[in-house]
Amino acid sequence: MSLLEVRDLHVWFELPNGTELHAVQGVSFDLDHGERLGLVGESGCGKTTTILALMGLFPPSVSVAGEVIVNGENILGKGESLIRDYRWKELAMVFQGAMNALNPLMTVGRQIVEPMELHGIASGAAARKRAGELLEMVGIAASGADRYPHEFSGGMRQRASIAMGLACQPKILLADEPTTALDVMVQAQILELLVGLSNELGLALILVTHDLPVVAQVCERAAVMYAGKIIENGTTEDLYHRPRHPYTRLLFATTPDLYDDDDVISIPGVPPRLDRQIVGCPFQPRCDSAFERCSSEQPALKSLDVGHSAACHLNDVPVSVTAKPESSPRNGQALDAVDGSDDGS
Ligand code: SF4
């Protein structure tokens, strides 16, 4: 049994005009003890919405369906009191933009102590001592507990947010773009800290980011999201060396390479609107490998190898058929790109 099992998760937002925006559309994945999973994709693909749903942080006006199974118990739909028991104790979150996540009117130490007291983990002097220890664990002197967030640098605020996330000794930490707006050196330190904490505490980590090199540096596995769905899921090694979806391949191709003189490329177009019904593959208007079937039939996420799945019609088509130039010239190129990088494993 996995530590966390997410099954067929859906999130709908009601828009002012009465229509619904289907932001997360049947997301499923597992997370084991101590495992580090990257949730990757462009802005608006559903990554942050997915983890906010796992934390049960949406108001009742947002519809959430599916199963979020923690230690064998489905915590979704069981009411706020059960989710409150799990939130911070089992699953904790480091929010995007540490300055926004920290209360500017409270000392950092008070903000770490508060969830401990709320969940009965510790109180009074014991909680304050633990807050100091947590700050030291993330590389800040214990005396920093008496300071206010504005007295910290951006990197220190992010470290303090991580200390807050760890206050109730969760088994799973959800980190939403934890290095956004930090300079490269501080970014590297924060990532190193997250990996170190994960190894040291056996902490499972879900890292939400649009930055693939960050995922490659931190995570063993990654799930690529597009238009509210997971479109490829596998080890970071598989996704980097053997991508089986054109979007994953293009995401890696758009990453600038310091040692390469080639122009930086971008993926043309924008993701589809999720308040409208999508016919065919959601990536079809932007895909350099699209063929006829893509505009009428939505591809399902299918298992390709052990632990590697993708949602793309190219994976159904034998190379000998798709290579026919008269049937689909661009598709032939794409299969070379996709399958040519596959070592056949
Ligand atoms: Fe491209 Fe078609 Fe695959 Fe979608 S199903 S990613 S449009 S080749």
Image (spheres, rainbow, N blue to C red):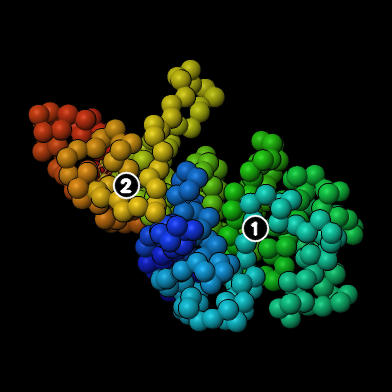
Q: Residue at x 9, y 29 (%)?
A: 326
Image spot of residue 317 (x, y percent): 16, 44
- Residue 201, visible in the rendered structure: yes
Query: Which of the two discs, 1 and 2, labels the residue nearer the N terminus?
Result: 1
- Dot 2 crowding, Cα within 10 Å, few <14, some 14–19, many 20+: many
Q: Residue at x 73, y 60 (%)?
A: 163
- Dot 1 crowding, Cα within 10 Å, few <14, some 14–19, many 20+: many
When asked about the image quadrant of residue 262, the answer is top left
Residue linked to disc 1: 94
Report the front residue among 333 and 291: 291
On screen, residue 34 above or below 183: below
Q: Amino acid at mark 1?
A: Val
Q: CA distance from mark 1 to mark 2?
A: 30 Å
Q: Is mark 2 within 8 Å of ligand 1?
A: yes
Marks 1 & 2, CB-CB < 8 Å contact: no
| Label 1 residue SS | strand
Could you tell whether 27 is left or right of 154 in the image? left
Q: Residue at x 55, y 67 (%)?
A: 58
Which quadrant, please, contains the N terminus? bottom left
Report the front residue among 228 and 92: 228
Image spot of residue 67 (x, y percent): 42, 73
Q: Amino acid at mark 2?
A: Pro
Image spot of residue 212 (x, y percent): 49, 41
Could you tell whether 5 is left or right of 282 in the image? right
Residue 282 numbered mark, or none:
2
Ligand 1 shows up in the quarter that is top left
Mark nearest the camera among 1 and 2 is 2
When asked about the image quadrant of residue 162, the answer is bottom right
Could you tell whether 277 is left or right of 66 in the image? left
